[in-house]
Image: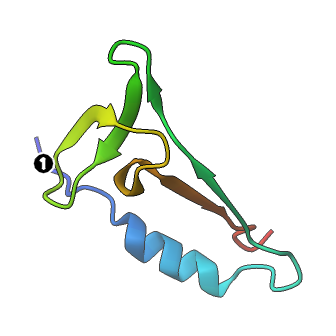
């Protein structure tokens, strides 16, 4: 059994971004993940801890998704 190292997504995105279709616009959307259990939003704190105790619009509860065509 060989141990595989985890994929390097940052490197993958950097490499693929060089090949991106420069004619297409990047689309950025902001989401919040809502926890029905806590009744609050999921947040990622600066210390990398994750909980579901954020209020609506909290800075650490924003999930920013940016699309790219990745060379298509």
Residue carrying label 1: 2
Q: In which quadrant of the rendered view does residue 42 lie?
A: top left
Query: Is 61 drawn above or below residue 65 in the view shown?
Result: above
Q: Position of residue 32 (x, y in %)?
A: 51, 41
Residue farthest to the right?
23
Q: Is residue 34 left or right of residue 49?
A: right
Q: Is residue 16 left or right of residue 69?
A: left
Q: Is residue 24 left or right of residue 16?
A: right
Q: How is the image coloured?
A: rainbow
**Near-viewer residue (34 or 56):** 56
Q: Is residue 33 left or right of residue 31?
A: left
Query: In the image, what residue occupies the spot 54% across and 58% down?
Result: 64
**Near-viewer residue (26 or 8):** 26
Query: In the image, what residue occupies the spot 39% across and 27% down?
Result: 40
Query: In the image, what residue occupies the spot 23% across and 41% down?
Result: 50
Look at the numbered disc 1 and give the secondary structure of its residue: loop
Residue farthest to the top?
37
Q: Position of residue 25 (x, y in %)?
A: 82, 75
Q: Position of residue 28 (x, y in %)?
A: 68, 64
Q: In which quadrant of the rendered view does residue 11 lie?
A: bottom left
Query: Is 11 drawn above or below residue 60 in the view shown?
Result: below
Of the 4 image quadrants, the one containing the C terminus is bottom right
Q: Residues within 10 Å of mark 1 (few under 14, many from 20)?
A: few
Of the 4 image quadrants, the one containing the N terminus is top left
Q: How many marks?
A: 1
**Near-viewer residue (23 or 4):** 23
**Near-viewer residue (56 or 18):** 56
Query: Is 57 drawn above or below residue 39 in the view shown?
Result: below
Query: In the image, what residue occupies the spot 20% across and 57% down?
Result: 5
């Amino acid at each position: 059994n060989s141990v595989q190292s985890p994929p390097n997504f940052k490197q993958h995105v950097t490499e693929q971004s060089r090949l991106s279709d420069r004619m297409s616009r990047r689309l950025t959307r902001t989401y919040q993940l809502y926890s029905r259990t806590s009744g609050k939003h999921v947040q990622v704190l600066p210390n990398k801890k994750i909980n579901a105790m954020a209020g609506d619009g909290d800075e650490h509860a924003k999930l920013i998704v940016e699309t790219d065509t990745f060379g298509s």
